[in-house]
Image (cartoon, coloured by chain):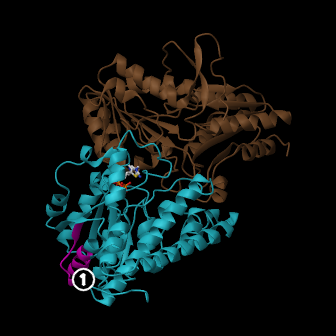
């Protein structure tokens, strides 16, 4: 995966992996705010199975980088209680699939506490977890369940695609007074990209145009940004100019940037790795259909994971998610260049 | 086994049983060593969690079961599947994502299910199968069969609330289920003492469940405990909670090679040299008069079965692409 240059490599920037960028965001926030702590399975010495948190326990100690039992419901509940009483916990949920175990604490408790209390209580809780298939991890370690979370009012949802975005959005998530779930694609941890030396925070709710173009808009989330970028290269060779919009956060959603791009190009494909039905793809497509209808030259298309559990066999798994080839083919159909 | 010279303490039929146990344990060991090689030579997609070192647990328990009894398994499930009767060739085929695999390649290492042998499936969610095993036991009771269900899980699953919900119901409703907690000392990369408060056996006792601790490296001790638990379940006297003390000789998964940050080499060496379940059984069988050639013969048979299984799987076809959206619904 090659990273788009959200920030041109210039003095004061270095290349970091997405994993390093997340690690740096956490370290900076923990240095600046003593109420920030991390709790999760194998987060301390192991630094998570993906090694994203390596080194943090050495700097901040086991009181702030806490290895928990395998108790996802428990750690999210404890995280919530701590968040409501003055701490800023980051709860690490190793695989996005285990979010199902977190759901009661998140959906029935964390998401509603501010509203139910008439604005009196706050839950500055950050949950970091994963999404994404094609790692040959089979049906219970490959799901992209961000739509389940985004469906519930009261939770913010962040899907960074680049190291730059991951760092800036993570810092914003920790500073938020609301529950935020950050989904990182586990296939992207090694993706490299420029990250400034100096501190920065990216606001939630601002989309990023990852590539400018004229003929067709690809609205892509998380690792689907890379699929879109590769498709755009193929399409450029065919004379099709592609614009890529990365919403970066699903809640809040930057409707204006997405709609403006669709109105400009007149054609839009929405690409998301969640399942097709009742998902993020459907939401984004509906938004474009509602707000850009009179400027569209073709129906909005959705490209998502198939509505099947993710199969183990590589020959089957690779069929279940959008690829640069399938996206490019769909775009060609849309612009009448089949 | 015709080469047996004499039996000192034990009857021939008992010796036959332990030679069978030896065969099953040797098969699991050979299978897992081959899985590791397939991973290292990049012939297997994804990862696998090896059962090497823990063979006596699955074998001792499954020897006390009938074919129609149920088990549920875990991410570290190859040993349970083989011990319950699965064939190495179809298991390898599953691990390689091939069509003749137990799940037509759709499940992979962590999801092998073998309905014909009562295996309701391995599971990649820690404690994910505790409800299934308990429900299978409830079903056996409601259908008035005398089947039992064994729920295998690692001590890491003691962190999950669902386990305690179902244990409570199993005790209340006297369900024929055996909770087999394999304590191999580590939840992934963290020692269980850092994640598990209090006493393990007491967690069963708290629900009024018969609970005991067993040396999980001693297949005969495991078998004896399992026989007692199965008898209790079939009698209608309800569940049993077994804590089987064991050790995984390899990493958490095949890629976990550098382990020094969470456990010492001395600890590993000690278990491997003093507490290898196959060596312990070998020692006992030799004391009973079984000659080394007999065991070598059984070992090489196991090896050959495994080799043939790998060959079969490597040559097998992948599923057809049309299968991708089949089996979503029954
Ligand atoms: C609900 C859930 N949380 C976390 C994981 C990740 N995970 C896989 S295996 C494992 C450790 C399991 O330890 P244990 O139950 O003792 O079994 P062992 O691996 O030691 O056999 C963890 C945390 C998971 N698969 N499911």
Part of the protein shown in magenta: B224-242
Look at 19% across and 48% down and name the residue there.
B197
Write down the chain letter for disc 1.
B
Does A37 appear above or below A298?
A: above
Instruction: Give residue B46's position: percent from left, percent from top.
Output: 56, 53
Instruction: Give residue B279's position: percent from left, percent from top.
Output: 36, 67
Does A269 appear above or below B27?
A: above
Side of B101 where A242 appears, left or right: right
Q: Please name whichever residue, B189 or A278, is drawn nearer the observer in this view of the structure.
A: B189
Who's cyan, chain-wise?
B
Look at 49% across and 78% down and name the residue there.
B297
Magenta segment includes B1: no
Q: Please name whichever residue, A71 or B315, is drawn nearer the observer in this view of the structure.
A: B315
Q: Quadrant of residue A188?
A: top right
Q: Is residue A253 visible?
A: no
What residue does disc 1 label?
A: B234
Q: Is residue B299 visible?
A: yes
Who's brown, chain-wise?
A
Magenta segment includes B240: yes
Q: Quadrant of residue B83?
A: bottom left
Instruction: Give residue B326's position: percent from left, percent from top.
Output: 61, 67
Which SS does the magenta portion mostly show?
helix
């Amino acid at each position: 995966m090659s990273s788009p240059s959200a920030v041109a490599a210039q003095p004061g920037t270095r290349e970091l992996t997405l994993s390093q960028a997340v690690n740096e965001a956490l370290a900076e926030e923990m240095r600046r705010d003593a109420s920030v702590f991390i709790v999760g399975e194998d987060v301390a010495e192991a630094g998570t199975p993906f090694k994203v948190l390596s080194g943090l326990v050495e700097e901040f100690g086991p009181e702030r980088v806490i290895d928990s039992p395998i108790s996802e419901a428990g750690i999210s509940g404890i995280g919530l209680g701590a968040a409501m009483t003055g701490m800023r916990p980051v709860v690490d949920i190793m695989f996005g699939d285990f979010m199902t175990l977190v759901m009661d604490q998140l959906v029935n408790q964390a998401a509603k506490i501010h509203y139910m209390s008439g604005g009196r209580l706050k839950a500055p809780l950050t949950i970091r977890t994963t999404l994404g298939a094609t790692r040959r991890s089979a049906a219970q370690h490959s799901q992209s369940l961000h739509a389940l979370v985004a469906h519930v009012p009261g939770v913010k949802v962040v899907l960074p695609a680049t190291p730059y975005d991951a760092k800036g959005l993570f810092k914003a998530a920790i500073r938020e007074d609301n529950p935020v779930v950050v989904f990182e694609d586990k296939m992207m941890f090694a993706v490299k990209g420029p990250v400034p030396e100096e501190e920065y925070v990216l606001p939630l709710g601002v989309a990023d145009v990852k590539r400018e173009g004229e003929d067709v808009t690809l609205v892509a989330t998380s690792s689907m940004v890379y699929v879109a970028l590769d498709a755009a290269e193929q399409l450029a060779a065919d004379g099709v100019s592609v614009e890529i919009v990365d919403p970066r956060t699903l809640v809040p959603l930057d409707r204006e940037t997405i709609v403006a791009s669709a109105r400009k190009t007149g054609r839009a494909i929405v690409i998301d790795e969640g399942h097709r039905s009742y998902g993020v793809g459907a939401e984004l497509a509906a938004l474009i259909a509602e707000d850009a209808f009179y400027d569209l030259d073709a129906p909005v298309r959705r490209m998502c994971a198939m509505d099947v559990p993710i199969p183990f066999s590589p020959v089957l798994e690779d069929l279940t998610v959008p690829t640069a080839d399938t996206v490019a083919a769909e775009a060609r159909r849309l612009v009448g260049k089949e | 086994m015709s080469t047996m010279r004499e039996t000192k303490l034990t009857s021939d039929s008992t010796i036959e049983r332990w030679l069978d146990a030896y065969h099953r344990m040797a098969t699991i060991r050979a299978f897992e060593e081959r899985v590791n090689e397939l991973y290292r030579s990049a012939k297997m997609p994804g990862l696998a969690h090896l059962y090497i070192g823990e063979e006596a647990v699955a074998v001792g328990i499954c020897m006390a079961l009938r074919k129609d009894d149920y088990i549920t398994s875990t991410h570290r499930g190859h040993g349970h599947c083989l011990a319950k009767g699965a064939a190495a060739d179809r298991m390898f085929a599953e691990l390689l994502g091939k069509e003749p695999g137990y799940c037509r390649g759709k499940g992979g290492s962590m999801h092998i299910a073998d309905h014909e042998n009562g295996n309701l499936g391995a599971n990649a969610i820690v404690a994910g199968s505790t409800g299934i095993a308990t429900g299978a036991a409830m079903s056996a009771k409601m259908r008035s069969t005398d089947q039992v269900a064994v729920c295998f899980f690692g001590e890491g699953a003691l962190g999950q609330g669902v386990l305690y919900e179902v244990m409570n119901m199993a005790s209340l409703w006297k369900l024929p289920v055996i909770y087999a907690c394999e304590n191999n000392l580590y939840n992934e990369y963290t020692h269980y003492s850092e994640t598990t408060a209090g006493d393990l056996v007491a967690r069963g006792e708290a629900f009024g469940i018969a609970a005991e601790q067993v040396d999980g490296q001693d297949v005969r001790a495991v078998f004896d405990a399992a026989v007692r638990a199965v008898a209790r379940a079939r009698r209608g006297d309800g569940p049993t909670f077994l804590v089987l003390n064991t050790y995984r000789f390899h990493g958490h998964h095949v890629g976990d090679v550098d382990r020094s940050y969470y456990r010492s080499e001395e600890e590993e060496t000690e278990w491997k040299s003093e507490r290898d379940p196959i060596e312990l059984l070998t020692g006992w069988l030799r004391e009973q008069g079984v000659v080394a050639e007999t065991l070598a013969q059984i070992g090489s048979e196991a090896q050959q079965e495994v080799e043939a299984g790998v060959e079969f799987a490597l040559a097998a076809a992948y599923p057809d692409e049309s299968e991708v959206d089949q089996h979503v619904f029954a």
